[in-house]
């Protein structure tokens, strides 16, 4: 099993889940938003070596092809991408380059090596501003940022390839808001720069690394005026990936599923839940809306629950408690973690 972006937030938790279920892994990552130190943690939790880990950029076709030459790859879980939607509004080209160019580079290597199975990280952002209420996979897509457009384009490329290559299977998972941390406190969300995502930013304010949270907008058409998202625990998120892999060979073709909890929480709901988890109010100010943000994104998860009998079990309080445990045990993130032993 090849995992791209396996050192990242979702990728590292997915590595634990897949190792726990007996998968042999090959991981590639360029560490643009992660560190190789995470693998020592993954191995400590799983009690197994990760396997082969390569530092490479997925746009480097020669290097990627060499990995496929060296290993027998039966399927790919493709996480590697840039993910900050608001940054993509300011600086779109790297988003198209890495997210689309990286995906086509990967597809080329897969094609050359007769690999026909892919799980792709898509995003709820493809729906854009779709109004109020749960969104199903048939809700029309209207990406509003270059990030969302890049993922939408990848979905279209995969749909086309599945159409033209009988036997090719792609499962696109449209994540809503994966967050939280491994319950051990060893793995969590540790971006290299200032966190763009709400939960790690809140955690860094609570631990004293940052002064105050800025709540981006309180004038949305939502109950308290702050934006509503559908937060999903990272452990529920990666369990769904394992189920996707288990079902990859069931039905060839393109399959698209929403991955969310199915419940909306406002930014202020999350601030309150995190304050409860850490035992003290997290200070915040109301700031301007963030470019590219939409008022509400909540998933209708009927399709994925029906397909794989997947039911998320961990709520917002668990997400906050686990994120806070990770932050407390790792006030400076993974910095200072020992590097992995050579398997
Ligand atoms: N976290 C979320 O809220 C969220 C929501 C929807 C979709 N997604 C998607 O899920 C995937 C994983 O997200 P994440 O939160 O783990 O992000 P992350 O930034 O923590 O992980 C991405 C990993 O990919 C690596 N990477 C980036 N560009 C690369 C390249 N050119 N070559 C090799 N490696 C590269 C990074 O170093 C990082 O380790 C992404 O595709 C993202 O768009 C994330
Ligand atoms: O410091 C912050 C950070 C975030 N927010 C707000 O909190 C909400 C959640 O923001 P995140 O950045 O955590 O998540 P997004 O919904 O903006 O984006 C995430 O989920 C999307 C899909 O829903 C994309 O896929 C994207 O890659 C991923 O980061 C948004 O309303 C945002 O404006 C703040 O108020 N202050």
Image (spheres, rainbow, N blue to C red):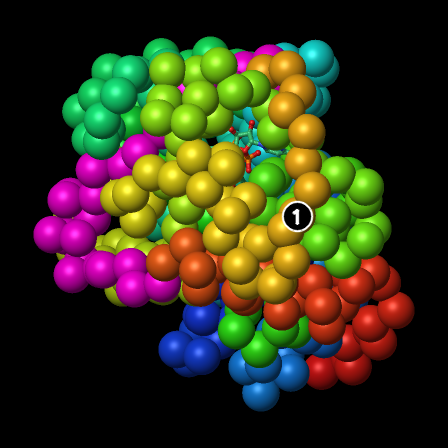
Q: Is residue 230 above or below residue 94?
A: below
- Image quadrant of ligand 2 equals top right
Residue 30 visible, this orientation = no
- Residue 283 is situated, as x and y percent measured from the top left of the image, at 69, 42
Q: Nearer the viewer, residue 319 or 36?
A: 319
Residue 15 visible, this orientation = yes
- Residue 70 is situated, as x and y percent measured from the top left of the image, at 61, 62
Q: Is residue 328 above or below residue 253?
A: below
Q: What is the magenta range?
A: 290-314
For image coordinates 24% across by 16% down, the residue present is: 140
Is 301 part of what is drawn in magenta?
Answer: yes
Q: Residues within 10 Å of mark 1 (few under 14, many from 20)?
A: many
Q: Nearer the viewer, residue 169 or 167?
A: 169
Q: Which residue has dot 1 on it?
A: 282
For image coordinates 81% across by 41% down, the residue present is: 211
How many numbered tags mark residues here?
A: 1
């Amino acid at each position: 099993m090849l995992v791209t972006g396996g050192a990242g937030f979702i990728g590292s938790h997915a590595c634990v889940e897949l190792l726990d279920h007996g998968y042999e892994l090959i991981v590639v990552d360029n560490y643009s938003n992660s560190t190789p130190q995470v693998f020592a943690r993954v191995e400590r939790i799983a009690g197994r070596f990760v396997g082969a880990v390569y530092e490479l950029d997925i746009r480097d076709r020669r290097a990627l092809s060499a990995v496929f030459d060296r290993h027998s790859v039966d399927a790919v879980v493709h996480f590697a991408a840039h993910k900050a939607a608001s940054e993509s509004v300011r600086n779109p080209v790297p988003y198209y380059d890495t997210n689309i160019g990286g995906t086509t580079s990967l597809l080329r290597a897969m094609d050359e090596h007769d690999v026909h199975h892919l799980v792709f990280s898509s995003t709820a952002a493809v729906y854009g501003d779709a109004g109020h209420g749960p969104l199903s996979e048939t809700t029309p897509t209207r990406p509003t940022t270059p990030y969302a457009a890049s993922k939408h384009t990848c979905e279209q490329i995969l749909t086309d390839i599945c159409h033209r290559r009988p036997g090719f299977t792609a499962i696109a998972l449209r994540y809503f808001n994966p967050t939280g941390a491994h319950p051990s406190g060893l793995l969590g969300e540790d971006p290299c720069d200032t966190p763009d995502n709400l939960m790690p930013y809140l955690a860094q304010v609570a631990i004293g690394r940052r002064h105050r949270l800025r709540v981006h907008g309180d004038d949305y058409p939502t109950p308290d005026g702050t934006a509503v998202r559908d937060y999903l625990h990272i452990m529920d998120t990666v369990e769904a990936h394992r189920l996707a892999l288990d079902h990859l060979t069931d039905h060839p073709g393109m399959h698209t599923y929403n991955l969310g909890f199915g419940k909306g929480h406002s930014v202020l709901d999350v601030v309150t839940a995190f304050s409860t988890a850490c035992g003290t109010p997290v200070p915040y100010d109301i700031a301007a809306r963030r470019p590219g943000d939409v008022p509400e994104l909540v998933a209708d998860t009927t399709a994925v629950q029906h397909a794989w009998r997947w039911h998320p079990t961990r709520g917002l309080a668990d997400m906050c408690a686990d994120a806070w445990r990770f932050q407390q045990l790792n006030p400076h993130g993974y910095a200072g973690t020992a590097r992995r032993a050579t398997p």
